[in-house]
């Protein structure tokens, strides 16, 4: 799974989003850089001090020259502007949001391109993040970084399920026991989506587009569960 796909799916977690924004706004961190370091550790991709330095330099430049200006204007447009209709202001804000997301993807793609291929071992998210932080100008609190690595790690299963959904609705499953195990996995993913939707909905300004996307994914999971359950029920010959 690409860095962009993994980061996007992780960011759908309300906890990951909250921690990222806290690290960005309160501790001067670049979210894309942090997610890159965690993803690299999860993938077993080696982040050396030299690589972290190159990545940090790229992220700092892109953050200062592109992401921060876009973010500042987008946030300004959340409030009314004298002489500009709310409809026009909100439309402009949505266009800026799309440009900001596109710019974040460019940075993530560039960071992935400079990262070595995945190794045999994975899971050292904290170690990769420590090396990346050593190259950053203003280190963040260890506790906040550890919380982000943990929250990111918790989204791994759901991200895997969605990746499989995007390539095949019904992967080949050998027997009833395997089908039942698959159904249990999909039901857990369905519950995780429910929790994510609930967390988003209670925000003062809920992201309706993201909520709609998660609801669509939930329906797709429900359909897949139904098809698998049908495979456990023998056809009745009339």
Image: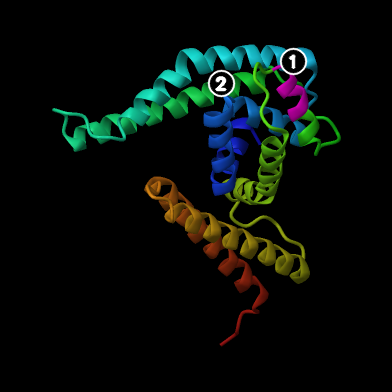
Q: Position of 106 compared to 136: left or right?
A: left
Instruction: Please tell me which residue is depicted at 64% across the width and 78% down the height of the picture.
Output: 233
In percent of width and height, residue 102 lies at 46, 26
Along the viewing direction, whichever of 221 and 167 lies nearer the viewer: 221
Along the viewing direction, whichever of 156 and 79 lies nearer the viewer: 79
List the residue tagged with mark 2.
107
In percent of width and height, residue 237 lies at 60, 85
Instruction: Please tell me which residue is depicted at 52% across the width and 30% down the height of the picture.
Output: 25
Looking at the rendered image, the quarter that the C terminus falls into is: bottom right
**Residue 10 within the segment the image draws in magenta:** no
In percent of width and height, residue 226 lies at 56, 69
Give the secondary structure at mark 1: helix
Instruction: Please tell me which residue is depicted at 60% across the width and 46% down the height of the picture.
Output: 167
Instruction: Please tell me which residue is depicted at 46% across the width and 20% down the height of the picture.
Output: 68
Query: Callout 1 environment at 10 Å: few (<14), some (14 to 19), or many (20+)?
Result: some
- Per the rendered image, the range of residues in magenta is 129-135
List the residue tagged with mark 1.
51
Query: Callout 2 environment at 10 Å: few (<14), some (14 to 19), or many (20+)?
Result: many
Q: Position of 190 compared to 209: left or right?
A: right
Give the secondary structure at mark 2: helix
**Residue 48, placed above or below residue 36:** above
The quarter holding residue 171 reads bottom right
Q: Position of 99 compared to 232: left or right?
A: left
Looking at the rendered image, the quarter that the N terminus falls into is: top right
N-term-proximal mark, 2 vs 1? 1
Please name the predominant secondary structure of the magenta segment in the image.
helix
Instruction: State the mark number for residue 154.
Output: none
């Amino acid at each position: 799974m690409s860095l962009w796909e993994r980061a996007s799916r992780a960011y759908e977690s309300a906890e990951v989003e909250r921690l990222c924004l806290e690290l960005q706004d309160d501790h001067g961190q670049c979210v894309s850089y942090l997610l890159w370091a965690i993803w690299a550790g999860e993938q077993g991709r080696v982040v050396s001090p030299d690589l972290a330095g190159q990545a940090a330099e790229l992220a700092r430049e892109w953050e200062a020259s592109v992401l921060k200006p876009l973010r500042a204007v987008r946030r300004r447009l959340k409030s009314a502007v004298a002489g500009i209709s709310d409809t026009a202001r909100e439309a402009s804000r949505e266009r800026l949001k799309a440009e900001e997301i596109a710019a974040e993807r460019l940075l993530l793609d560039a960071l992935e391109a400079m990262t070595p291929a995945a190794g045999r071992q994975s899971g050292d998210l904290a170690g990769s993040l420590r090396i990346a932080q050593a190259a950053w100008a203003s280190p963040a609190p260890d506790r906040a970084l550890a919380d982000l690595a943990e929250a990111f790690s918790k989204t791994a299963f759901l991200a895997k399920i969605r990746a499989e959904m995007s390539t095949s609705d019904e992967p080949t499953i050998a027997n009833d026991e395997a089908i039942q195990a698959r159904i249990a996995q999909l039901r857990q993913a369905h519950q995780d989506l429910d929790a994510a939707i609930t967390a988003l909905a209670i925000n003062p300004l809920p992201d309706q587009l993201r909520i709609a996307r998660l609801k669509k994914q939930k329906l797709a999971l429900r359909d897949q569960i139904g098809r698998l359950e049908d495979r456990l029920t023998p056809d009745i010959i009339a």
